[in-house]
Image (spheres, rainbow, N blue to C red):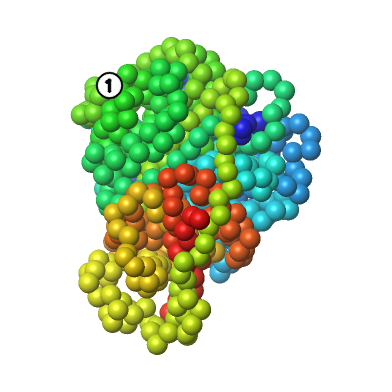
Amino acid sequence: MIYKIADNVLSPLGATTAENYQAMKDGRSSLKHYVSFSGREEDNFVASRFSNEQRKQLMVSGLTWFESLVYHSIKQALSECPSGVITDRTQLILSTTKGNIDHLASSNYENLLPAESALRIARLIGVTMQPLVVSDACISGVAAIITAQRLLDLQCCDVAIVTGCDIISHFVVSGFQSLKALSPKPCRPFDIERIGLNLGEAAATMILSNEDAQGIQWQIVNGALRNDAYHISSPSPKGEGCCSAIQEVIKDIEVESIAAVNVHGTATMYNDQMESKAIESAGLSHIPINTLKGYLGHTLGASGILETIITMQSIEHGELLATKGFSDIGVSGRVSISSQSVPVSGHSFVKIISGFGGNNAAIYCKYGNPVARQSELVNYEVLHRVQVTPQEVRIDGSISNITPPISDIYKRYIGSYPKFYKMDRLSQLGFVTSELLLNLEQPRKRACDDRAIVLFNHTSSGWVDKEYAQTIRHRDSYFPSPSLFVYTLPNIVCGEVALRHGYHAETSFYMMDSKNEAMMDDILQSTFFDHTIHSIIAGWIDYQDEQTFEADFKLLSRI
């Protein structure tokens, strides 16, 4: 059993979980109108941001704004824990989409990459284990909780500090504006008049343990990750991936015992419609649902953790908070949503979330009596391995006559997927390496639900981040590129491979400050805890420029 022993939500509405919950219960929202970073009036936006006074109070000397929020959230959560939580078996898992991206132009940016920030914060709070960053677009927070649950089950650590954070930056705001995804007014989730999302900045922390502390506690009972394999920036209209994740986490649960479903509810046309269909298909139409985006906006890497914590508070108080901004239903799937708080009597809930790259995640949380879980260690074998560097290509350990550059490999050995030329360099590298790897598999597996994709790197999506930044650098030549912006999420490489082959199982992307084969093996071992997964495309992939890149992919199979 995995227990939550402490938590924190740090947002413009408050510095503690209790303050945030009370503010939401009172109907308060931190969404406000802001002048555009670009200076163009048409780009003004609505968002949830910390005030200048709050920033002054929260900034930590020697840390960036992003790092300061993470640090404060963790310290507040730790203050609620018994002594001895920080040991040499305490793991820090950070979820974020863009981290310190507002410092991209800094000459010191290499030291501000998400994995470097995680390492710096880990050492500040006394954690000696190598930290892990989860970067799976909007589902990062829930994916981080699932990763922590698995590593605790595998007994890789005794305590996991799971923290999510993202901040408001010109980079991120301009990107969502380029996608025409932002609403110029406070968002209206699931409403017939919804026209887009609002962004928000926040940090949220959940401290998990496999040891039962005194008193009744929340448990993370089950979690699942699924890919639509439909489109890298749009959800499947029928919500198959989301529905599959829900069905997996509630498969052994009496549906009537579920008090509520907290949904992603971004207030975009496609997301809310998709979630309504997924909920209906999963047989949860009669269960009350809500979303918290009307209070704090979409907080990206923090959202999954923040919303899980607030929903726990809500269930403890016997109510489901109102969906702020909702008035008249605007989705075709049957759902039970309200603009008012509604009483609930159960002691468990489902949290769902979806994101770019075809990602979908769900967790089932329960308050009260422990629920027994068994996660058996799985042995796996390496079927094939492909390594690609600027110097050579190795296939199953032998130097191949296939030679870089990557575009030449594509033209000579693949050449039948025109979308390749629309990809960023990281995705092109991953695409070509996976094609060479899967060419070794006979027959090649396609359109399946049992193959996962789990990748790791250090530099995130650094190459395309710089390319996109050039499109928003000057006011006189301001043309934010939506096609580039989507690829500034490193997990898109996983989505491209899943889409190419019709893989509907888990797709996950992790970052480390240095390549650690032992930790990577732990992640892969724990990924096989999902009984539906029988094989994994796994490996390290980093791209800095044409002279500096590496892909080392393996095809793993459950024994």
Residue situated in front as seen by the camera: 54 or 238 = 238
Q: Say which quarter of the image contains residue 281.
A: top left
Residue at 44% over, 14% down: 344
Pinpoint residue 96: horizontal percent, then vertical percent.
Answer: 50, 49
Pinpoint residue 164: horizontal percent, then vertical percent.
Answer: 54, 43
The extreme front residue here reads: 559
For disc 1, the marked residue is 327
Evaluate whether residue 519 shows in this view. Answer: yes
Please indicate whether residue 454 sits to the left or right of residue 219 in the image: left
Say above or below: 445 vs 337.
below
Q: Say which quarter of the image contains residue 112.
A: bottom right
Pinpoint residue 102: horizontal percent, then vertical percent.
Answer: 49, 56
Residue at 32% over, 30% down: 282
Residue situated in front as seen by the camera: 121 or 469 = 121
Say above or below: 7 vs 450.
above
Residue at 47% over, 76% down: 396
Residue at 60% over, 54% down: 522
Say above or below: 354 vs 290.
below
The amino acid pointed to by label 1 is Ser
The extreme bottom residue here reads: 401
Q: Secondary structure at mark 1?
A: loop
User: Which quadrant, please, contains the N terminus?
Assistant: top right
Residue situated in front as seen by the camera: 265 or 149 = 149
Evaluate whether residue 95 shows in this view. Answer: no
Please indicate whether residue 216 sits to the left or right of residue 504 in the image: right
Crowd tier of the residue under label 1, counting other residues whose Cα lies within 10 Å: few below 14, some 14–19, many 20 or above: some
Pinpoint residue 460: horizontal percent, then vertical percent.
Answer: 49, 62
Q: How many marks?
A: 1
